[in-house]
Image: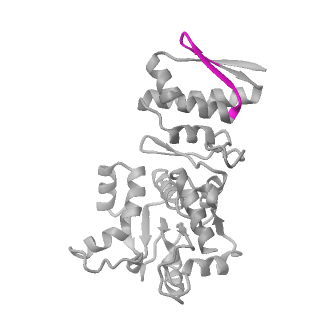
Amino acid sequence: MTESTLAVHSPEEVLALFGARDQHLRTIRRLFDVTITHRQGQIRISGEPTAVEQTTRVLERLRELGRRKGVLSPLDVRDAVAQEGLAEDGNTGPRAPVPDVEIRQAGRRVQPRTEGQSRYVEMIRTHDLTLATGPAGTGKTFLAVATAVESLKAEQIRKIVLVRPAVEAGENLGFLPGDLRAKLNPYLRPLLDALNDMVDFDQARNLMEREVIEVVPLAYMRGRTLNDAFIILDEAQNTTVPQMKMFLTRMGQRSKMVVSGDTSQLDLPKGVASGLADAVARLGRVPGVGVMGLAKSDIVRHRLVQRIVEAYEQQEG
């Protein structure tokens, strides 16, 4: 048995750290099997040496985050715990520690939260073309955009091109009001949302006006050659095989491509082959091409998303 102490400066800081009705405290105690007490501005952690070290690091992360935010959510606790290789809900058991891969942009820190996500980021960095598949919520688009912004900031590329096929997900958008740009906005909105998480609004608008960042539908890529660019194709499962071939051959000198999608969510007409599935099969063994399959264990949205995916898979099975 060993002990560790952590200083806190006010009752408000203790409340933020422990959570309403000690919900955060109970979660941490349960996961690390330690005893945690608070007295006179000192939090005392006691238990097995490794568990005490891990718990102390988790509480230190949460203390610093609480000082910035004021209130901590269960998601904040899950993220802090995940960095020690454990699932916050305790259902999946121990996980391999996440390698220290970080992306810093716009004053915030973006870090892969699972081992699969870390391998994904590393694959993007070491391959000119990465093909990624996985269910919703695994960070396929978010991490690709973050890595692209990092490359732009480091002046490794001159522009970012974010691409999406304009395929309707079971709804007819053809009668939406507005010009072509307004009609295309619903298709491109997820890419813009990911971008706005990396770059503040004014800076993003300035970069888009200068065409340093482009957000375009797939059809607009025909006939182009992109040099010194980081090109991301999102929702690639909804490309046809000819469309995928057209997109992949846009890559110019000193460029990098990431193609991602969820092959379980096809919106193509029945009988039309997915360009993403075809590309994975054709190019998986080509030197310089990385193929990454993210899994349900890599889902980092609300914890229910993983269970929703599992429920639909069971029903379809």
Q: Position of residue 47 (x, y in %)?
A: 74, 24
Q: Is residue 60 left or right of residue 11?
A: right
Q: Nearer the viewer, residue 314 or 106?
A: 314
**Where 107 falls versus 18 (above or below)?**
below
Residue at 59 percent of width and 48 percent of height: 113
Q: What stretch of residues is rendered in magenta?
A: 32-44
Q: Residue at x 64, y 61 (%)?
A: 295
* Residue 238 sits above or below residue 161 on the image: below
Q: Residue at x 39, y 50 (%)?
A: 199
Task: Answer yes or no: is residue 285 visible.
Answer: yes
Image quadrant holding the N terminus, namely top right
Q: Nearer the viewer, residue 292 or 225?
A: 292
User: Does residue 225 appear to the left or right of 278 in the view shown?
Assistant: left
Q: Is residue 49 magenta?
A: no
Which picture quadrant has residue 116?
bottom right
Closer to us: 131 or 261: 261
> What's the residue at 62%, 32% (across, down)?
28
Image coordinates of residue 222 in percent, x first then y, are 42, 82
Residue 131 seen in render: no
Horizontal relation, residue 88 to residue 110: left or right: right
Asked whether 109 or 93 is in front, the reply is 93
Instruction: Single out the residue that lies furthest toward the top.
Output: 40
Where 164 sits versus 138, above or below? Answer: below
Q: Position of residue 143 (x, y in %)?
A: 52, 56
The residue most toward the bottom is: 271
In the rendered view, would you say 26 is above or below 244?
A: above
